[in-house]
Every structure is written in structure tokens, then in C-alpha cells.
Image: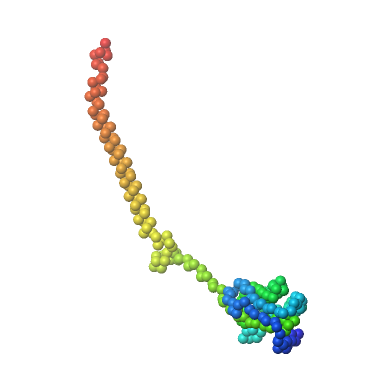
Amino acid sequence: MICSILLLITLTSCVSGPLVVDVTQSSYQAVENHDVTLEWIFKTTTDGSFKSIRIFCEIITTLRPFILFYLRQGVEISGIQDKRFAGRVKFDKDAVREGRLRLHMSRLRTDDSGLYSCRVNTGDGWSSRDCYLNVTAERVRPKPETPNTSSGGRDASTTGSPSQAESPGWIGLYCGLGLIVAGTLLGVCYYLCRKHSLIHSQSTELDPVIHSLEPDPVILSL
């Protein structure tokens, strides 16, 4: 069946007609495990229904061509699709009615890279156009290295954690805070000593006055 379809398309492609197929982009770049949409546009001089449109898409690689999908009389023939594209290739039916073939490919693989060819027949003969898709491998982000501080060797002292690398700054901060606290304590001690000496001097100056105000013992005996 597959050979018959390919032979039919090959023979009918020799028939020239007013149908012209083009691509919106000649090449695409995509990343592995991502999605991409390939697009073809076609115009015809006759008004045909959706059921009269036939589309055959394949990818051409160095090994052999792989069939993406085949649309015949508005029905997708899934039996001839290569298994590697099962569930990963879809197209927009509404866009086809407007003369646009939008081929959605999901979960891309690196071996999806190749030349994509789509042939369209709207009743005016076959016409085709190719575009190239290049799928690159997804970059794997390296895991952050965790320092080994358990050994305590030379490597541990030079490649320690950020807190160890900043230890001189913390030491300077602690020293500054210590000086501030010590200066505050000295100031408080000086203030208390000064106050104590002032009170003592005032009490010494008031002693004669206090003694002069004390009543005479003789008077008290009377």
C-alpha cells in the first residue's frame, strides 16, 4: 500500500498545474524536547472543498524517507505514518481550508533533524516545497559543587563555604563591636566614679553646717 501511494504521488507530481506551494521559512532551529510548527502555504485558482485536498508529508534523511502523515479526502491515513512520529505530529484543519498547512511537532528529538517535504493536491495537480529543521541537544546544567569541609585539608581551607571566605570581615566587625562596648563601659564607670566623688565632697562640706545645727546637750537636758 505504501509503495502504491508513493508511486501515485510520483506520477501525478509530473503533471503541471496552477497550484503553487511555498514555505514561510526555509529553515527552522529547535531544541530537543521542545515543540516546533512548520508551515506551508498554497493557493489554487479553483475553489475546492476540504475533502478534495490531498497532502503527503515526509522527512528525508540520509538513511531513508520517513512518512509524517497523509491526508486524503479530508481524512488522515494514520496507518502509513512512521511509528517514531506517532502522537507527535498534528496539523490544523481550519488552516488547511484557508490554504495554510501548519504542521505541529512536539517532544522533538535530535534525529528529527532533516529535510521536510510536503506535497499538496487540490485538484489542480501536485506541487511541493521543502524546508529544513535542525534540532539541537538540550543543554544539561551542571549541578553546583558542594565544598568538602570534612577533610580539613588544604583544599578545605581554600575552597570553603562563603561564610568561611568572609571570616576576616566578620572578625573585624566583632573587634569593632568589642571596642564600642568597652568604651561604653569605661564611660559609665567614669561617670559613676565622678558622681560618687562629687557626692562625697558635698557631704564633707555640709558636715560643719550639720554639726552647727545640732542642739546643745545642755539645752536638751533641761
Q: Residue 2: image x %, image y %?
A: 73, 84
Q: Is residue 77 visible?
A: no
Tell me which residue sits at (37%, 58%) in the image: 169
Tell me which residue sits at (67%, 83%) in the image: 128
Picture layout, residue 149 above or below residue 211: below
Would you say 156 lies left or right of 47 here?
left
- The part of the image, by quadrant, that contains residue 31 is bottom right
- The part of the image, by quadrant, that contains residue 49 is bottom right
Would you say 46 lies left or right of 195 here?
right
Picture layout, residue 194 above or below residue 115: above
Q: Residue 183: image x %, image y %?
A: 31, 46
Tell me which residue sits at (24%, 13%) in the image: 218
Q: Residue 17: image x %, image y %?
A: 71, 85
Which quadrant is home to the C terminus?
A: top left
Which quadrant is home to the N terminus?
A: bottom right
Tell me which residue sits at (28%, 38%) in the image: 193
Would you say 124 lies left or right of 205 here?
right
Q: Is residue 49 visible?
A: yes
Q: Nearer the viewer, residue 106 or 191?
A: 106
Q: Residue 62: image x %, image y %?
A: 62, 86
